[in-house]
Amino acid sequence: MKGRLNIFQRTMLQWDSFYPYNAIGIMRIPVRLEEAALKDALRQVLERQGIGSLEIDPRNRGYEYLSDVSGVDLTVVDGDGEPVERVRREAELQLNTRFVRDGTRCNPFRFFACAGGDCFYLGIVYYHVIADGYSMALTAREIVRQYLGQGSAGPVSGRDLYPGTYSALIRGKGGLLPRHWLRLPLFMAGLRRASKPFGLYHTHDRSAGCSLLTMDPAAARAVARMALTWGVTQHDIFQAIIYKVISPFVPSKKVRDRKKNMALGSVINIGRDLGVRQQRTFGVFLSSFAVLHSCPGQLSLEALSRDIHAQSSLIRKDRRYLMTLFEQWVALKWMPFLPREQQMKFYPKNYPLWAGVTHMNFRTLFDDLACGSEVGLAALVSTGPNCPVIFAITRIRDTVNIGITYRREVFSQGDIEEMTENFLRHTREMMQGEE
């Protein structure tokens, strides 16, 4: 085995043993769909990057990309006059379909395409254990470039497929210091005091649903301006909006206890902490952190954003998000001793979240393409065992697309539709507040 899985990858692999843990990038490409040309472009990019076939050794925590590309798994679906809805349904199917079934070898990518008149939609389904959103986006750009006949922009085959593990955080200056270790019990105690979605304790329905929405560009610009005015980050505002749209459902949902705090998780890219050059490396470089609030529904959006910023700024300044890696390491060591049913309840009990957020800004990613200003990108991510709904926020120029993935055992499709309406309503109110 040529590479070793880092802590976050091993955690994802553990989650994948419970149910499919996949991710999807959905692109809108402003040219007509030609199936043969698309399949050839996909094959060339996978071969050039050397990521067409994967073998994982879970026992020894190793993995290796194999030289052979056995074939491109491309499904072309009929838009039936509603290509966006057809894409959503196909994405939902792909989220619930495993990559590794029998054995340890698989093609870590599947693709689907749907024509939409003068454009088409391309879904890039990938095994989340091997790539994060940034690695996926760079690969997506190469696919579009190849399909448009612009060729490769550089030595893509030189991307590092076997980056080092997170051990660099221990060796590096200012990494996982003793002060982080000492804070771990307090960190875990705070999360255990948060309310727990009771639905995650059930194992009868682990399937996921999904939804897609797009913010008005004017609303996206309003979020950026209000972040400066309020002295917070755009991510803080998005977290506040998600708190607002989630909180009305919490009292109506049966929770595991009467604890009042609601925890909201955020995935964070730690490539900079690892010294990774993202453009030259393919892999997963993630950690996460959580913020807690007892009464998000009672505050204004500005007040809630400031409260969140007070927590998140300290977390980022002191890099407390690294403590999550300790928690994952403990879980990896402890969970194998538990019965299967208790393993599935471990995260909902010890790291309970009501929602998760991943926020990726690719504003200039496609600018070097001939039609780059018209290329769209959205993301969908499996929820994980401790979180009933994930909001994946992706920004290209002034367009913000939000992919929502949810657990059906906690939220219904009607719940999610109401959340999306309220999400857009809050962003429109921010625009009106500037006038």
Image (spheres, rainbow, N blue to C red):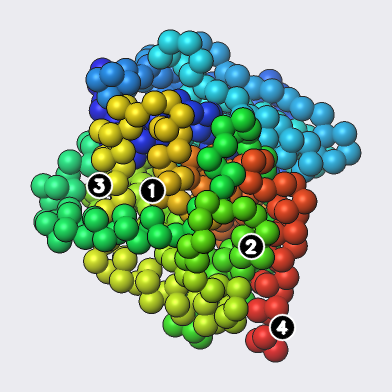
Question: Which residue position holds label 4?
Answer: 432
Q: How far apart, in angstroms, are the residues tagged by discs 4 and 2?
A: 30 Å
- Position of residue 192 in the picture relative to residue 400 (left or right): left
Question: Which residue position holds label 2?
Answer: 251
* Image disc number at residue 326: 3
* x, y percent for residue 32: 76, 36
Residue flagged by tag 3: what amino acid is it?
Answer: Phe
- Which label's residue is closer to the chain start, 4 or 2? 2
* x, y percent for residue 110: 58, 25
Q: How far apart, in angstroms, are the residues tagged by discs 1 and 2?
A: 21 Å
Q: Nearer the viewer, residue 206 or 131?
A: 206
Crowdedness of circle 1 by 10 Å Cα count: few (<14), some, many (20+)? some
Question: Which residue position holds label 1?
Answer: 350
Residue flagged by tag 2: what amino acid is it?
Answer: Pro
* x, y percent for residue 95: 60, 33
Is residue 80 shown above or below 366?
above
Residue flagged by tag 4: what amino acid is it?
Answer: Gln
Question: For numbered disc 4, what is the local secondary structure?
Answer: helix
* x, y percent for residue 342: 42, 33
Q: Nearer the viewer, residue 207 or 268?
A: 207
Task: Assess whether mark 4 and mark 1 are in contact (beta carbons under 8 angstroms).
Answer: no
- Which label's residue is closer to the chain start, 1 or 3? 3
Is residue 395 shown to the viewer in this render?
Answer: yes
Question: For numbered disc 3, what is the local secondary structure?
Answer: helix
Q: How far apart, in angstroms, are the residues tagged by discs 4 and 3?
A: 44 Å
Residue farthest toward the right in the current orientation of the protein: 81
Residue 122 is drawn in which quadrant? top right
Q: How far apart, in angstroms, are the residues tagged by discs 1 and 3?
A: 13 Å
Residue 308 is drawn in which quadrant? bottom left
